[in-house]
Amino acid sequence: MVRTFVKHSEVIEDFPELMTIVRAVFDTSRALETAISQPADYLKMLRKKFPKLRTAAAEFREMAPQASDHTNFRQAVISMDGCIDELELILKSFPTAAPPAMPANFRPPSSSVNLSTTADTPPAD
C-alpha cells in the first residue's frame, strides 16, 4: 500500500527522491515472489534484498515529513517501519537454519486478489 500511495501521490512531482521507497518495495517484492514456495530460498533472497529495503525505509522516514505533513504520509512511515521490524524478526527467527519444509500440498497464493469479498462476508458453506 505504501508503494502505491507514494507512487501515485501528487507530492512525488516535487519530491522525486521519494521514489526510492517505491523502487525498493517493488524490487524486494518481486524477488521474494520468485521463491515463495521454497522457504530456504525465500529467506536467502530476503537476506540479500533486506539491507537495501531497510536503507530506503530509513531515507523515507527522513524525507516524508519534508514532502508533506499529511496524515497519510505519517501513516506510510509507520507502516514501513512496521514492515521493517517484522522482516527483521523473521530473519532473526531463522539466523542460520532453514525454516521447516513446506507441506507437499502447499500452493502459493494466487496473484489475483478478489476485492469483492470483505471481512463482514460470512464464509461459504
Image (tube, rainbow, N blue to C red):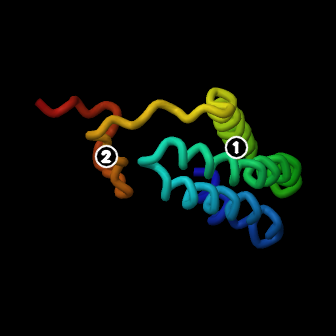
- Identity of the amino acid at label 1? Met
Image height check: is 96 above or below 55?
Answer: above
- Residue at x 49% of width, y 58% of height: 34
Residue identifier under label 1: 80
**Residue at left 39%, top 37%?**
102
Label 2: which residue? 107
Of callouts 2 and 1, which one flags the residue occurring earlier in the amino acid sequence? 1
| 29 to the left or right of 9 | left
Q: Is residue 60 left or right of residue 115?
A: right
Q: Position of residue 28 (x, y in %)?
A: 63, 56
Q: Inspect the image, locate mark 2, and give the three-letter code of the amino acid beneath it.
A: Arg
- In this orientation, which residue lies closer to the viewer: 113 or 31? 31
Position of 8 with respect to 77 (left or right) is left
Density class for disc 1 (Cα within 10 Å; few <14, some 14-19, many ≥20) is: many
Q: Residue at x 74, y 65 (%)?
A: 19
Which residue is pictured at 11% across the width and 30% down the height?
Answer: 125
